[in-house]
Amino acid sequence: MTETRQQLEVPPDDWGRRQNTVQMPWMFMAIVAALLAGRFLLAPHLTSPALQTWATVFVAICVQALPFLVFGVALSASISAFVPASFWTKALPKRPAVAVPVAGLAGVVLPGCECASVPVASGLISRGVAPAAALAFLLSSPAINPVVLVATAVAFPGQPMMVLARFAASLLVAVCVGWLWQRFGRTEWLKIRTHSHSSFLEAMRHDLLHAGGFLIVGGMAAATLNVTVPRQWLTTVADVPWLAILALSLLAVLLSICSEADAFVAASLSAFSPTAKLAFMVVGPMVDLKLIALQSGTFGRAFAIRFIPLTFILALLASILIGGILL
C-alpha cells in the first residue's frame, strides 16, 4: 500500500516539460510586451540617436512580424492536429516534379508574410508532403499572395508590369529551388520535426516558443545592420546597373522588411532602375535576416547553409531575367 501511494505521488517524467510548455509562450508574449513598453518609456532617456533608431527598428520588426508568425504557427498546428496525413497524398500530385509547381501556385491563396511560411512548411513536411514541394510553398506564399500583389500595385500605380514581373520572378524562383532540392537535396540536410503533440494548443505553444526566439534574434541582427550600414553607400552605386541590382538585393536581406510593406520601400528608391527594385522585392520575402534565423532554427544549420545561398542566387538571376524581359 505504501509503495502504491508513493508511486501515485511521483510526478510523471514529462511533468516539468509540460509545465514549461504551458508557461514559456506566455513568457514570450510578456517579453514582447516589455519591449513595446520599454521602447516608449526608455526612448526619451536614450541620448544616442543610433540607440533610438535601433530600438525603433527592432521593435517594429518584431511587432510587424508577430501577428503573421502567430497566424503561421496556428495554421501549422491546425495541420498537425486536424489534417490527416492521407489528405496530402491526395491533394498533391504523386510525382514530385509536378507537385513542386502545384505547391508553388498554392502560395497564391495564403495571405501571410515570410514569418508565417516557415512553420507552415515545417508542418507540411511533418505530415508527409515532399520537402521539395513544401519548400516551394515556403518561398512562394509570402511573395505572390493577393495582399502582396495588391500592395505592389498600390506602391507602383500605373505600372502593372511591375506586379506581373514580381509574380513571375518569385514563382520562378520557388519552382526552380523546389526542383533543384528534389534533384540534389539529401534527407540528412533537412531536420524534420515530427509533430507528436496531442492537441492543437500544445502544438501551437511549442511552435510559437520555438519560432519566436529565432524571430527576436533575427530582429536584433536586422536592427543592428540598419543602424550601421551608411545610406550614402546606396546613392553611390545606383548609377552602375549590375552593382545597383546587387546592392538592393543585399539591402533587402539586411532590412528584413515584411513582404506586405517592401513594395513601398522599393518605390521610394527612385534613383534605382526598375530591375533593381524588382530584385529588392523578390529577394526580401525569400532571404532576410529573420528568415535566416527562423529557417536555421526550424530546419537546422545544414539546411540553411545550402538553401539560403541557393535561394539568393536564383532570386537575383530571376530578377535580372524577368526584369530584362518585362521592365
Image (cartoon, helix red, strand yellow):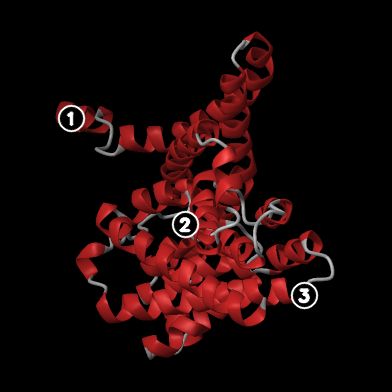
Residue at mark 2: 287
Give me the disc on residue 160: 3
* Residue neighbourhood size for the residue with mark 1, other residues' Cα within 10 Å, grouped as few (<14), some (14–19), many (≥20): few
Distance from Cα at disc 2 to Cα at disc 3: 25 Å
Q: Earlier in the sequence, mark 2 or mark 3?
A: 3
| x and y, in percent, of residue 143 in the image | 60, 66
**Badge nearest the viewer, 1 or 2:** 2
Is residue 45 placed above or below 172 in the rendered structure? above
Amino acid, disc 3: Pro
- Counting the numbered discs, the total is 3
> For residue 158, which quarter of the picture?
bottom right
Distance from Cα at disc 1 to Cα at disc 3: 79 Å
Q: Earlier in the sequence, mark 1 or mark 2?
A: 1
- Quarter the N terminus occupies: top left
Q: Earlier in the sequence, mark 1 or mark 3?
A: 1
> Dot 1: what SS?
loop
Distance from Cα at disc 1 to Cα at disc 2: 62 Å
Query: What's the residue at 66%, 80% (across, down)?
Result: 326
Side of 7 where 36 appears, left or right:
right
> For residue 95, which quarter of the picture?
bottom left
Amino acid, disc 1: Met
Residue at mark 1: 1
**Badge nearest the viewer, 2 or 3:** 3
| x and y, in percent, of residue 295 in the image | 39, 54
Side of 156 where 279 appears, left or right:
left
Is residue 159 placed above or below 232 in the rendered structure? below
> Which of these two is toward me, 233 or 28?
233
- Quarter the C terminus occupies: bottom right
Query: What's the residue at 42%, 80% (across, down)?
Result: 86
> Dot 2: what SS?
loop
Amino acid, disc 2: Val
* Residue neighbourhood size for the residue with mark 2, other residues' Cα within 10 Å, grouped as few (<14), some (14–19), many (≥20): many
